Image (cartoon, rainbow, N blue to C red):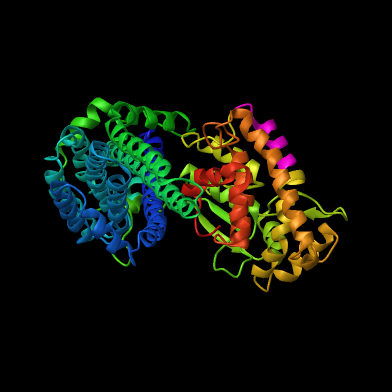
Amino acid sequence: MSVFYPDNPNRADRVQQLVTQIHAIQNNVLTYVNGIKANCDRAVQYLDSIAKHAGHQTVDEYLQAAMAELPQNERENFEKLKQDLQSHDGFFDAATKVAGALMCIASVVGTGRSAVSITVKLYRTHMLQLTVLAFVRGTALIFTGSVDSGMTLVRSAFGVAKDAQKVEGIGGTLGKTLRGLKRFSEVIGVLGPTIDALALTADAYVGSQQKEQLQNAIVELCCRRFSVKKLEQQAFLIQLSYGDAKAILSDYEGFLKDIENEKVTTQYVNQKMEEKLSKAADEVKKMMQDSDRLSDQKIWSDLAAMDRASSIAWTVEDPDLAQILPRLEKIGIKSAILTEREGGETSRLARVGTVPVPVLYVRVGTNIRNRAASESVCAAKLALNYKGLPYRTVWLEYPEIEPTCIKLGVSPTGTKPDGSPFYTCPIIYDPTTKRYVSDSLIIAQYLDETYPETPQLVRKGTAPLHLALEDAFLTIIGPSLFQLVLYESWVLLNEASKPYYKMTREAFVGTKLEDLAPPGPKRDEAWKQAEASFGSLLKWVEANGKDSDLLGGDSICQSDFIVGAYLIAAQRTLGEDSEEWSKVMGWHGGKWKRFMKWLEPYVDESM
């Protein structure tokens, strides 16, 4: 007869919760790695323009010529690092080009000792950063099932690190970072006994064997969660750094055009770029040295806060930090991984359960594949990306929205003129809470409340201000830009959505879409109105200070995403390289160009 163990259900719930958390953190790592790749790819586009300004046909040709100007030791070491990384993974092609470009530009814009000093400083910091990125990228490959490729890259990173540690000025910093990453790489595999969800949960109410298995699973999963969280923070910091690098190359491209148009002098540009590059190098080094942000105790505190915010966290048998660290030191590299391998055997921990992710229902609309045709959808996607929350998207055409909402039981967001319910997208379904939520602001508030460990968009006590700002923007400022892109938006729609969109929008604006802002004096006047309207928005932004670029002040808030969504929609319909979009980016001394740079890390191809 089996003995009843009353805490086994709590243990089983804790196992499931830890796996859910680990999957979420792993997905964050993948999101950050994708963000790094996107930043690098975009930076290379700027670099292509820079190369052509310098009289070269290709980026490679430009870099080859510029690298010849670097000190021999730095040049040879960097080339070796680049070859080592690129031989294992094409991901590093863009990353090493960006690093090389910054060093090359430093040698061009600097003078005498200044040029050498900044170049060497950038060389040291990027040797450090690329080495750490090799670990992050390798483990990301493992998470997605490319175990052999990932492990090869991780092992290669250790070889690269040995060379990098010899570089004067980064050995100590890299050594500390490597010790933490080495510990992580040894936790990639499954820890201890096999964990099978059915064995652990089906009979969770009885049996000493189940009790022991569940207790072991909790300890092992806590170790894994700690390690993955540490990697997540490294990935996040590197994404920020490459975002800064992209911005520097964008600025330099713009400066070169200004020199060509005789708007600024070469001396002015060199001085500005020298300042930017020196600051960037200092920030990367500080980022890697910032022991407080990446300390074991800080990671542990973040995880504890995550558990405190949960209504189901049963942490009675969790190991503490003093127990986890020695255990991690003893673990050897294993081959199994947390995620399910494509087309292969499901790993042991993956069998604890496939973790459901939130589902975002959006309007697809555009004939550009899987691209949303709604500003509010862009705002919701920006919020999810900013928080690093994984989600899958269900695309709907305009006529499908109402029947889908009715079928799912989603509440309407308003009332039509005839008094009938009005349904809109986006809608988010969270399988964790089994709730449907619609309306961008309400979605942001829900995500803040449900996932408190993520960056907050609607800070406590500010909801009324966001509501007022959103209402003012959508009724006064947004429409001034909206009228300029409404017809172009309709042109981009899929045929299934065009009749509905045209009928409803023409009823709203009281004229045919093609007559709203056609080329000529009427459109010119509309552009003047739009610029004046954004001048009012500028006052709201600069209420935080003249140097502020955000409504949220020092950090992004939900209202920034509402404004950003309209600008993204305008960029999409007008064309990023169009004269009209360039006009918007030049308004108010380039304020909105700087605003868009804040949003770039959270914009994806579906917007």
Q: Magenta segment, which residues?
A: 460-473
The answer to whether 366 appears left or right of 392 in the picture is: right
Residue 575 position by quadrant = bottom right
* Residue depicted at 44% across the width and 45% down the height: 265
Q: How many marks?
A: 0
Q: Residue 124 at what x, y percent from top left?
A: 22, 40
Does residue 31 sit above or below 552 in this rendering?
below
Q: Main secondary structure of the magenta part?
A: helix
Q: Is residue 345 above or below residue 462?
A: below
Residue shown at 76% from the left, 65% from the top = 518
State the residue in front, 323 or 243: 243
Image quarter (top left, top right, bottom left or bottom right) of the C terminus:
bottom right
Q: Position of residue 421 (x, y in %)?
A: 79, 53
Looking at this view, is 65 or 390 the one in front? 65
For the question of whether residue 493 can be seen, the reply is no
Q: Estimate the x, y position of residue 591 in percent, counting from the top left.
A: 58, 42
Q: Is residue 99 visible?
A: yes
Q: Position of residue 109 (x, y in %)?
A: 33, 45
Specify whether residue 574 is painted magenta: no
In-front residue for pair 233/256: 256
User: Up-down: is 180 above or below 28?
Assistant: above
Residue 234 image-quadrant placement: top left
* Image quadrant where one finds the N terminus: top left
Judge left or right: residue 311 versus residue 330: right
Residue occupying the far right of the picture: 418
